[in-house]
Image (spheres, grey):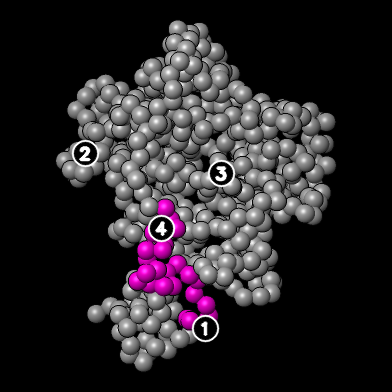
């Protein structure tokens, strides 16, 4: 099925499973449907099964949105115990989107169905909501812990068995479209069969050096290995270290949720020569989430990092904003330079990214789908180097393989069933100018920063070691926060956060 055909089926008001191999444009298609729906005045709940996935779509977790949290069953008096605001959010939504659906247990989807019925006071599936599920069952599966209820893929749920969802299986490859042989390897992993020639092609990438002019990131299986590599590599670089502190807004509990879900670091430390990864798409399309590069300098006035990307383009990275959205409500936000050190990153955190190139260690792969997720991050095999492989690297869920043929067949049938709607959708797309969602006039970041610096000249500039020592000394001498704010040209909140970092979070406790 093409992206356009899936959009036509969703546009017809159907609840849909949007699936397909990595690189077929599931996220792009979702974004297109969100734009179309909002132009019609629809209220959309953007959710995902994990916090990280939620930040990719500027949404919230399905656990939070539904009010169910981590409960394995619907609690007694569920609706009565919800806040009025939570009830309003669920009742006012027209469309519910749940991304990375492969990681959701089947019983949780049934719980969400029931919860929506109770809150919306309707016996219709999901209380009358149109529901769009998106994900690939060949990627990371639901995690079953010993302290929680066992569950399988959402295809085992009662609501799925009742044929509530139309399957839209995207088949056109966009990420690896220029490397057919590599596409066939990835498809072979999905099918559970790799030829000896294909296995040898992968093994031939073990220990292969990538082009020296292109920086590359290592994908590893554990956080411990990742943190160790990044810390050591940064310490080995000469020169001054610049630190960029995250700025947050909103209640502490929501801020912490956003921090845990986001790839941005609270304190980003950089030096010239640091290998970095962009962790957001730029609005001017100069870089994307996953773009790699080297820090080549810092702007003289702002100290913002200047990065030479692997593409050859040189860009200056300015603070960007992540938000925790809950329906139309903004719960929290954070601002940080959209970079992280990229000598290493975990495979789990790479899901959803497209990397320029990567060095991947699959010698410690420990879960089905991990190898497929890692290998499908790069566009072609020439962008790949392997540190090692084990048998688990080629494994995908047997259940995913079993249901895959069913999903493909169901998607083909859907094209025939909705042929008229697809035809009409294509005709309208040709005849009607695209509708854009009216946007409120907003200040650009540069304008906001210029306004802030009228009062706080050093706002968002990195702290130097000299400034830190002077700040701590001045505070120890009894200078007030107000005086320190004027002295250092920074907001009181920034002064307070910096002192808590150096002296402990309890220094202002009464």
Quadrant the C terminus occupies: bottom left
Q: Is residue 48 visible?
A: yes
Q: CA distance from mark 3 to mark 1?
A: 37 Å
Nearest to the eye among marks 2 and 4: give it: 4
From the top left corner, tell me how far across and down residue 282 is, in percent. 53, 47
From the top left corner, tell me how far across and down residue 74 is, in percent. 27, 37
Crowding at label 1, few (<14), some or many (≥20) Cα neighbours within 10 Å?
few
Decide whether residue 508 is among the magenta residues. Answer: no
* Cβ–Cβ under 8 Å for marks 3 and 1: no
From the top left corner, tell me how far across and down residue 422 is, in percent. 47, 12
Crowding at label 2, few (<14), some or many (≥20) Cα neighbours within 10 Å?
some
Which residue has dot 3 on it? 285
Q: CA distance from mark 2 to mark 3?
A: 38 Å
Which residue has dot 2 on it? 87
As helix, strand or loop, the secondary structure at mark 1 comes to helix
Please provide the residue range marked out in magenta.
444-468
Nearest to the eye among marks 2 and 1: give it: 1
Q: Is residue 31 above or below residue 469?
A: above
* Cβ–Cβ under 8 Å for marks 2 and 4: no
């Amino acid at each position: 099925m093409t992206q356009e055909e899936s959009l036509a089926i969703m546009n017809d008001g159907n609840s849909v499973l949007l699936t397909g191999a990595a690189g077929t444009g599931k996220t792009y298609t979702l974004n297109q449907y969100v734009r179309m729906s909002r132009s019609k005045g629809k209220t959309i709940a953007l959710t995902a099964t994990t916090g990280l996935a939620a930040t990719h779509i500027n949404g919230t977790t399905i656990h939070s949105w539904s009010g169910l949290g981590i409960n394995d069953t619907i609690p007694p008096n569920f609706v009565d115990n919800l806040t009025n605001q939570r009830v309003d959010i669920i009742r006012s939504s027209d469309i519910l989107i749940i991304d990375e659906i492969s990681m959701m247990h089947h019983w949780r989807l049934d719980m969400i169905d029931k919860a929506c019925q109770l809150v919306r006071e309707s016996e219709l599936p999901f209380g009358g909501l149109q529901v769009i599920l998106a994900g690939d069952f060949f990627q990371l599966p639901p995690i079953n812990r010993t302290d929680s209820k066992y569950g399988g893929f959402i295809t085992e749920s009662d609501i799925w068995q009742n044929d509530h969802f139309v399957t839209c299986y995207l088949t056109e490859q966009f990420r690896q479209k220029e490397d057919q042989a590599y596409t066939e390897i990835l498809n072979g992993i999905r099918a559970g069969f790799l030829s000896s020639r294909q296995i040898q092609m992968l093994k031939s990438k073990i220990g292969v050096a990538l082009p020296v002019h292109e920086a590359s990131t290592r994908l590893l299986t554990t956080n411990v290995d990742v943190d160790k590599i990044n810390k050591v590599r940064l310490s080995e670089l000469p020169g001054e270290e610049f630190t960029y502190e995250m700025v947050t807004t909103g209640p502490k509990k929501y801020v912490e949720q956003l921090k845990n879900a986001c790839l941005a670091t609270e304190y980003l430390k950089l030096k010239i020569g640091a290998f970095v990864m962009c962790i957001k798409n730029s609005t001017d399309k100069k870089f994307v989430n996953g773009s790699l590069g080297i820090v080549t300098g810092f702007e003289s006035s702002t100290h913002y990092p200047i990065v030479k990307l692997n593409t050859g383009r040189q860009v200056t990275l300015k603070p960007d904003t992540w938000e925790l959205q809950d329906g139309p409500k903004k719960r929290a936000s954070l601002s940080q330079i959209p970079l992280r050190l990229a000598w290493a990153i975990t495979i789990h955190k790479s899901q959803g990214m497209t990397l320029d190139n990567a060095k991947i260690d699959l010698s410690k792969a420990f879960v089905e789908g991990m190898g497929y997720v890692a290998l499908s991050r790069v566009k072609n095999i020439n962008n790949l180097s392997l540190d090692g492989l084990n048998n688990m690297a080629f494994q995908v869920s047997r259940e995913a393989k079993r249901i895959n043929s069913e999903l493909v067949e169901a998607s083909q049938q859907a094209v025939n069933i909705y042929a008229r709607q697809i035809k009409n959708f294509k005709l309208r797309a040709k005849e009607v100018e695209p509708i854009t969602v009216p946007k409120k006039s907003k200040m650009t970041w540069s304008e906001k920063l210029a306004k802030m610096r009228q009062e706080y000249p050093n706002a968002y500039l990195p702290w130097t070691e000299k400034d830190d020592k002077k700040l701590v000394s001045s505070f120890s001498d009894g200078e007030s926060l107000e005086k320190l704010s004027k002295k250092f040209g920074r907001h009181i909140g920034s002064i307070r956060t910096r002192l808590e970092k150096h002296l402990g979070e309890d220094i202002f406790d009464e």
